[in-house]
Image (cartoon, helix red, strand yellow):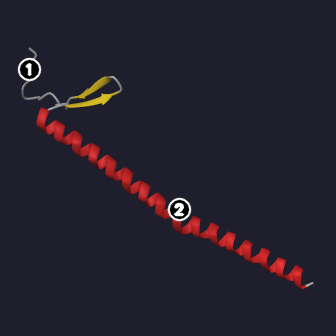
Amino acid sequence: MADKKSVLITVLVLVIVILAGILIYAFVIRPAYTGYVVERQTEGVQIAVNAILTQLQQNGFVQIPIGNQTLILVPYTAPSTAAVETTPAQ
């Protein structure tokens, strides 16, 4: 009889430890890991944006290699309305 009680207590303690581990993972480890990943992704985007802006300021355009091709980005400047000559209709 004592052997069955000790086995039952061991099984219950094991179930409690497993559930505690699941809760710690769900509410502590996973959010911390997700926060780390998001922080690194944000840092990578910031590095890319800074590189693009630096290249734009130096060259006036940006070259982005994609595979074996290069994408060239040129800033758009709207046509000035003052430079357009208009003649009045008669």
Query: Does 26 sit left or right of 8 as displayed?
Result: left
Q: Is 30 situated left or right of 53 in this image?
A: right
Residue 59: x and y in percent read 13, 32
Q: Can you name the residue that lies furthest to the top here?
A: 90
Within-10-Å neighbours for mark 1: few <14, some 14–19, many 20+ = few
Give me the C-alpha separation between circle 1 and circle 2. Answer: 65 Å
Can you tell which quarter of the image residue 37 is in? bottom left
Q: Position of residue 45 (x, y in %)?
A: 32, 47
Residue bearing the label numbered 1: 86
Contact, mark 1 vs mark 2 (Cβ under 8 Å): no
Amino acid identity at mark 2: Arg
Q: Quadrant of the C terminus?
A: top left
Q: Which mark is residue 57?
A: none
| Left or right of 86 on screen, residue 51 | right
At a point 23% along the width and 45% down the height, the residue shown is 50
Q: Residue furthest right?
A: 1
Callout 2 crowding tier (Cα within 10 Å): few <14, some 14–19, many ≥20:
few
- Helix, strand or loop at label 2? It is helix
Q: If you read the primary sequence from the N terminus, does the residue marked by circle 1 or circle 2 appear first?
A: 2
Which label sits in the foreground, 1 or 2? 2
Residue at (26, 44) in percent of width and height: 49
Q: Quadrant of the N terminus?
A: bottom right
Type of amino acid under label 1: Thr
Which corner quadrant of the image does residue 22 belong to?
A: bottom right
Up/down of 9 relative to 58, above or below: below
Q: Image point 64% across, 72% down: which residue?
A: 20
Mark 2 = which residue?
A: 30
Regarding mark 1 in the picture, which secondary structure is present there? Answer: loop
Q: Is residue 78 or residue 84 the one in the foreground?
A: 78
